[in-house]
Amino acid sequence: MSGQKRTATRSEHVLEDLDGAALSYAARFADQAENQRRGSREELVQLALPFAGRLARRYRGRGEPLEDLEQVARLGLVKAVDRYDPERGSFTAYAAVTITGEIKRHFRDRTWGVHVPRRLQDLTIEVSQATAVLTSELSRSPTVAELAARLETSEEDILAALESAAGYTPASLNGPVGDDGPAELGDMFGALDADLESVDDRLTVSDLLYRLPARERRILAMRFYGNYTQSDIAAEFGISQMHVSRLLSRTLTWLRQAMLTDSPPRWESGTGQPDNVASLTLSVDRAGSRVRVTVRGDLDRDSAEQVRLGLADAVRTCAETEVLVDLDGVPSVDASGVAALLASQEVARRAGIRLRLARPQPYVRRSLAVAGLAGLFDEPSAERAER
């Protein structure tokens, strides 16, 4: 008991000495020169360093090195010395509040592993304290609703505070996994993507594919994505297997050349014409009571306007009651070609003339049927297809 009493008395004497030294410092400060003021300030700070160290040791064991806490406490002590006003009370009381506030600010602003708003930081502390109290009262872990009721806040705020608490000391990616082995936690997240380097090539190829005619695009898709054989593709388009082989060879050669140059070369069609020159031809002749329009070439976006204008002209100059469009020479058709035929059908309907589609190849026939043009097929052609 006597030892405890002597310790308390010694502490009180230290505080009294600090208060007396602070009063003396404040009384001399106003009349001293600048260099003398710095000396008096350093003397008071040196005298109060043990006091700041004792305040810092109250917060040890909370995840921060004691040396860092002592540095923060000393910074708070310097601020207390510079702002001390004897008329407002005891220096030790003011210094204790200033130093403690500096240490708490350090924990709030510097020790969180991720940035968390001040409001959530304070709420996290309140939730932790309320959890301890309710666990003791209920003999179990409290629910989110019970914590919200105790703290008089919403359940969403409680959940946000619980989630934010995990950001105080996040796990290090360099932390070991398990007790043995050199593996680290960061090794468990993701891996090098072997296909990452091919992304640029894939994007380039995707853009180049749209520069190809519709037939060549479909043949490539069937061969390399649908795993069709060349014979299957030939049967689909109604052409020979050798022709499919030539089309594939020419298309792949063009793609390789386009990949190796900044500006892709022009697509050369099978007739030797570049892709920006229409390779489709129309011929109009009269056969009995019909006007026959023979179309040869790919019916795509490059030739769709030519077909639309040619059929519209044939309808306007038609003295008969029916226009027959021979599609035997059309190996492929895309959406633009279908739109041209639909527009021609509407022009013929308004003119009171019947528009018929004759001898479409299998692939073209299926495309037109899907587009709703099956009703325009010439009956003899339809009957041959059914047989």
Image (cartoon, rainbow, N blue to C red):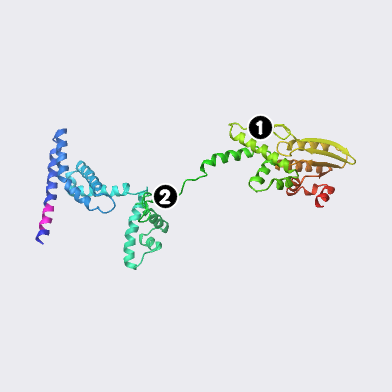
Q: Is residue 8 magenta?
A: yes
What residue range appears in magenta?
Answer: 5-12
Q: Amino acid at mark 2?
A: Asp
Mark 1 to mark 2 CA distance (whole Å): 48 Å
In this view, the residue in front, 363 or 78, is 363
Helix, strand or loop for the magenta stretch, by majority: helix
Locate residue 244: give its quadrant. Answer: top right
In this view, the residue in front, 347 or 214, is 214
Vertical side of 96 occupied by 314: above or below = above
In this view, the residue in front, 213 or 61, is 213
Q: Residue at x 83, y 36 (%)?
A: 284
- Residue that badge 2 annotates: 187
Q: Quadrant of the N terminus?
A: bottom left
Residue 266 is labelled as: 1
Q: Amino acid at mark 1?
A: Arg
Dot 1, crowdedness within 10 Å: few (<14), some or many (≥20)?
some
